[in-house]
Amino acid sequence: MNIGIIGFGKMGHVRAEAIKRSGRGQVKRVFDNNIQVDFENYSVAATHLDIINDPSLDAIFVCTPIFLNKEMTIAGLKNGKHVFCEKPPALNAKDIMEIREIEAASGNKLMYGFNHRHHTSIKYMKNLISSGEYGEVIWMRGRYGKSVDANFFETWRAKKQFAGGGILFDQGIHMVDLFLYFGGEFDQISSFVSNNYWKADIEDNVFAILKNSQTGMTASLHSTMTQWRHLFSLEVFLSRGYMTLNGLRTSSQTYGDEILSIAKNRTTAPAATWEDEEKITYHEDKSWRSEVDHFFDAIEQDKEISIGNSGDALNVMQTIEAIYDGDPSYER
């Protein structure tokens, strides 16, 4: 397949490398506002429209700042392109509903980059949950945090009109997506959203409790940019066991080793001990290749996007908005 990439910063390069490694597509043209000449053996388009309107391209990857995602996605679909778009998918859920209508009319494939679902550890956890061997999900706890410095606030990510929100929108959205992936939807949400430290126009901390009133399944989330160190931790406790994932294998290596611990529970004393746990360490991040393969499979075999489709995008955006609304004192 012939591919065009709009937005050729860090994520554009990551996607280009994953496409190259897959051997299933060629990046024919790229565009970024900061690129004026051909470089790195890529043909540079003069504008994003040159990529969207290029009849020789089968698909486009949208790796732009968030406020441009909707515009680029719609233009791609309307011009007969399959579209892969980074997360967050748009600025709000209403935008996603509009995109879904255009997607349905176009007949083309649309996939969103909820990358964490493609980590090998997450796939394994999902399979265990689906197998029923460990029972039903009772509760989940997710912590996702990073450190930023004052220079961060000079970037587009720190400006609400361009980024849509702060740490919840930028990073916490991955954890919310995993809650939905593992446990289903939530209809009761309470939260505290604050910018007490950085005092910017985006939030720097979010504490949220989410509940499914029918099943009683509950999840707690802390999304933060005052962690002072990068941290990822996801715990899933089920009726017959548990699994905890600490650390995340990334290109930056800032989240530490990706280690999954799994054990069955005990209904009688003594409780499970650390020695009872099975520990699996993941030394390689295969998520980027997995995403590209999933997208290409859907195109080549004309099948539905099952991970990261527009329905998933709508669910996560509606949940994110409910978390913001869960704190009436926070003005978004």
Image: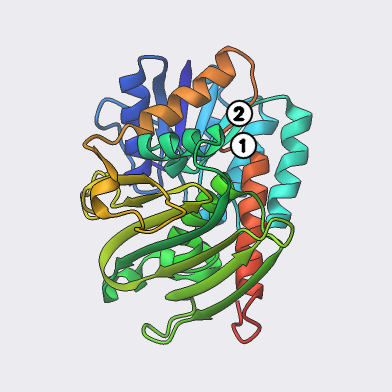
Asked whether, in this view, residue 226 is left or right of residue 76, the answer is left
- x and y percentages locating residue 5 in the rendered image: 44, 34
73 or 140: which is nearer to us?
140
Q: Quadrant of residue 151?
A: bottom left
- x and y percentages locating residue 189 in the rendered image: 65, 69
Q: Which residue is mark 1?
A: 309
- Vertically, is 22 above or below 60? above
Q: Quadrant of residue 157?
A: bottom left
- Vertically, is 206 above or below 29? below
Q: Residues within 10 Å of mark 1 (few under 14, many from 20)?
A: some
Q: Which residue is mark 2?
A: 305
Mark 2, secondary structure of its residue:
loop
132 or 209: which is nearer to us?
132
- Vertically, is 94 above or below 193? above
59 or 221: which is nearer to us?
221
Q: Is residue 88 in view from this perspective?
A: no
- Asked if the residue at tag 1 contacts the one at tag 2, i.e. Cβ–Cβ closer than 8 Å, the answer is yes
Q: Residue at x 41, y 15 (%)?
A: 24
Q: CA distance from mark 2 to mark 1?
A: 5 Å
Q: Quadrant of residue 304?
A: top right
At label 2, which amino acid type do we have? Answer: Ile
